Image (cartoon, rainbow, N blue to C red):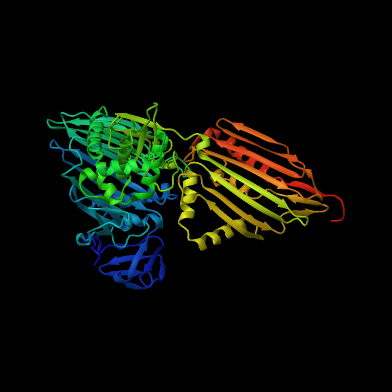
Amino acid sequence: MKKLTPILLLIPLSIFPQKVELFDGSVINTDSIVLKGNKVILSDTILSRDDVKSITFKVGEVEAASEKLPEDIRELVESRKGLIKRYGDYAGVIMLDEGHSRLNPDGTREYKYHFQGLILKENRRNWGTFSRYLNEDMEKINIEMARVIKPDGRIIDLDQSKIKTSKPQRGIVYFAKGKTVSFSLPNVEVGDIVQYAYTEYVFNPWNKEIFSHTWYFGGEDPVLRSIDYITIPRAKKLNFKLVNAENAEVDSTITDSCTTYTFSMGNVIPPLEEPMMPPRGDLLPSVHTSIFETWDYIFEWYAGFQRERMKVTPEIQSLVDSLIAGSETEEERTASLYHWVQRNVRYISVKGAVSSGVSGHPAVVTLKNGYGDCTDKSILFSTMLHAAGVEAYPVYVHTNDGPTLVKEIPSSYGNHCITEVFPKGGGHYFLDPVGTSNRYPSFSRMDHGIWAICAVKKRIDFIDVPPLESNRREYTYTIKIEDDGGAEITFRSQYAGDYESIIRGYWERLKPEEKRLYFSQMVKASSPNAVLVNYSLENLTDIFKPLRMKIVYEIGDFLETAGDMFILKLPEIGARYTRRELGLAKRIYPLVYMTSEEITHTFNIILPEGMKVSYHPEKINKKMNELQYEGGYSLDDNTLVYADDFKRRVRKVPPEDYIKFREYMGEITNYVKKPVLIKKVGGER
């Protein structure tokens, strides 16, 4: 049964044209609505409230009744008109986004949150559904209130008995003690205001001495008021940094026992959406806070967990000795262990105690289990490297789809764990044993261009984008032209870096019959008349060796005709240089790739004796900052050769360079699509 605020049950509303939706799916448009008891009185009929699913009110609908509403509700309802007019293009507007984090003297803490949002489009009805993860060994959550405020001021409160606590659905590779607290407000419709507040009590934090906090003043929707309160014992000092928040207001209040800091902003407009833009967390105004001025304590805490778990046991040493037997160099030993961990330790996350949640299980436990999460696999891999005489440690990172580390503010940062290796010859480099298909020394592209926290070495290092040769894709075509214009095409490819891992992983998962079907579809994409002859995947399951792909196919009408000429167009190359991310004429934000890129092509086009090249485009050489392209044709007897090399050394293209980069890529695409003209010589055609 819906709970309605009693003051509204007898309010007649004569208002602008409205829409009434019934539970049977029918819709009634009316110029007049009177709400009286359990009746909804329209201009030409009377309905029971139980039959009415929703009433959609137009702007200005509640002026006549608003004076009779409670003050707080009246203010909310009256504000709707201006908000709809001002923010009508958005899906919703957050009227209040308020959080209060409190650190108690004993190290426990609590967090209060209050949300208030006006739903403007259908996809924001999900504001009426609340879900939050809960670890019952650490914390408890209390839903203080939740309600829907209808356009006429009616209130539908959450039935507290509808709050659910259940095990989250995390899939087959994640198991944890945590649960999910959730509820769904009833009858949430476009035009409603959703409001809820909850308190989270953390009675057993990971570490009572560590307190850090990040607050984003905006999100995907406009925010009218965003306030972050932080209360800490008076004896402690808060270290903070504002990012993209020049207009934020900062204040503090001191009492005998505590200091409360207030960070607030108003009228925060979300970033415009662009393809492949920087992570939202790098664009939004934010405040980053910590009670530490240096990373020393966090380094020591993390390092303590890691050292305890990185014990070289007899089982580990025996395994390592067997795996590196015959390896002559440190690199060979590292590669053998890197490949073994990827292929033999499955990714499954099982977390129980706080320590395992932060710094993984002991290496020997992960080895015996044969599975673990990113932290577990990195600890095991680092331990195995130590057993092989190679120095290495787990490092915490945040993958490059997330916000950049604010190094000035020490915090429990990261969503991933990989390994940093320190070879005897000096320097350092990174490997990610969490995947299954990365050939040494490649590692996942999501780890490129980010910061890594190495607790044991007390350092924070930047993970550079790999050099081009580590991300190269090589494509070679041998095209034998027949007298009638048909062709047999032999395609070969070889890869380096994470791209190879993606290709290898894709084909490994397919069954033999699926492989042939997919290869057939691939050649059909080149030409609808293409016929697959055969294919091979060399070294598919041997991660120690480069993956090589070979496809042989035939196209009966490969050459097009135009009068007395044949037209030859290079297959597939144009698609590789056609980029969907370049659809915008200009950009506000940088264009962000995950890693660097190099692509090379070699086309060996063998002509029959009766054909001669009449025209081919001149060579091209384009260069722009860290971007370069060279390509061109050459003729050797009856073989026409096209070779090119595309290089992009950087992950990010600044907005001021975007227009030129877009033109640059367009010129490349247009160039490789230019036809070659071939003339038949000697005899009739």
Q: Quadrant of residue 579?
A: top right
| Pick the front one: 369 or 374 | 369
Say whether residue 326 is left or right of residue 111: right
Q: Image point 26% across, 58% down: which residue?
A: 183
Say whether residue 170 is left or right of residue 622: left
Q: Image point 21% across, 28% down: which residue?
A: 237
Question: Residue 314: in sight, yes or no?
Answer: yes
Q: Position of residue 127 (x, y in %)?
A: 33, 54
Q: Position of residue 282 (x, y in %)?
A: 40, 37
Considering every residue shown, the one lying at the far front of the view is 326
Q: Image point 36% across, 57% down: which residue?
A: 125
Q: Which quadrant does the N terminus fall into?
A: bottom left
Q: Position of residue 141 (x, y in %)?
A: 20, 50
| Pick the front one: 487 or 298 | 487
Q: Which quadrant does the C terminus fall into?
A: bottom right
Q: Quadrant of residue 456?
A: top left
Q: Image point 42% across, 35% down: which residue?
A: 328
